[in-house]
Image: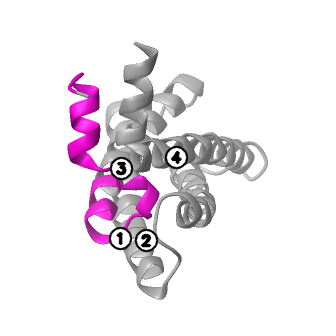
Amino acid sequence: MISAAKKWISLHRGFVNYFLISCFVTVLDIAVSFALEKCLVSVFGADASKAALAGNAAGVVTGFIVQYFLCTKKVYAGSSAKTLIIFFLTWLLSLGLAEGIIYVVRTLVFKDAEGLIYFLVGKAFSIVIPFFFTYFLRKALIPQKEENIADKDNNTQEVNGNE
């Protein structure tokens, strides 16, 4: 079973690297989002739904910057101007999608309710859906590092036990 897991990871190295980077960036995003939202509401008396949108945007911007630098080192074949433009444009689409999800969940579903559970539910949906959207879009548009592109024929045979 461990051998099969290692082979699967080897076969999907680009996705695994992207996923691990995204997990790290997600923790950073949540921390920034939550801290800014709480600060805007507590210190400045901002409306909860507006504070949620501002906090989410700040978290996503911070995450974008960190994710770009890590992904160009571990997932994509360099950091060319084209890669930066594609990364930025897909990020903008993802940001719009995440903001829309936050708005729907926090404002329409939970009626501007405050609290950790409302924050976490909205944040979870605004992370998971854009994650898959941007991963597959970027995979189609940005060249991958050679080590992340496994020899599909050999690895498929190994995973199936046809060595």
Q: Nearer the viewer, mark 4 or mark 3?
A: 4
- Determine which residue is flagged by label 4: 22
Given the image, on which type of amino acid does mark 2 rest? Phe
Which secondary structure, mark 4? helix
Q: Nearer the viewer, residue 97 or 108?
A: 97
Given the image, on which type of amino acid does mark 4 rest? Ser
Q: Quadrant of residue 161?
A: top left
Q: Which mark is residue 142?
A: 1
Which secondary structure, mark 2? helix
User: Which region is colored magenta?
Assistant: 135-162
State the separation of the CA atoms marked 4 and 3: 11 Å
Q: Quadrant of residue 83?
A: bottom left
- Determine which residue is flagged by label 2: 87
Spot occupied by residue 43 in the image (x, y as percentages of width and height): 79, 48
Residue at point 28%, 54% (across, down)? 136
Label 2, residues with CA under 10 Å away: few <14, some 14-19, many ≥20: many
Earlier sequence position, callout 4 versus callout 2: 4
Q: Nearer the viewer, residue 105 or 60?
A: 60
Q: Nearer the viewer, mark 2 or mark 1?
A: 1
102 left or right, relative to 65 = left
- Determine which residue is flagged by label 3: 130
Label 3, residues with CA under 10 Å away: few <14, some 14-19, many ≥20: some
State the separation of the CA atoms marked 1 and 3: 17 Å
Q: Is residue 130 visible?
A: yes
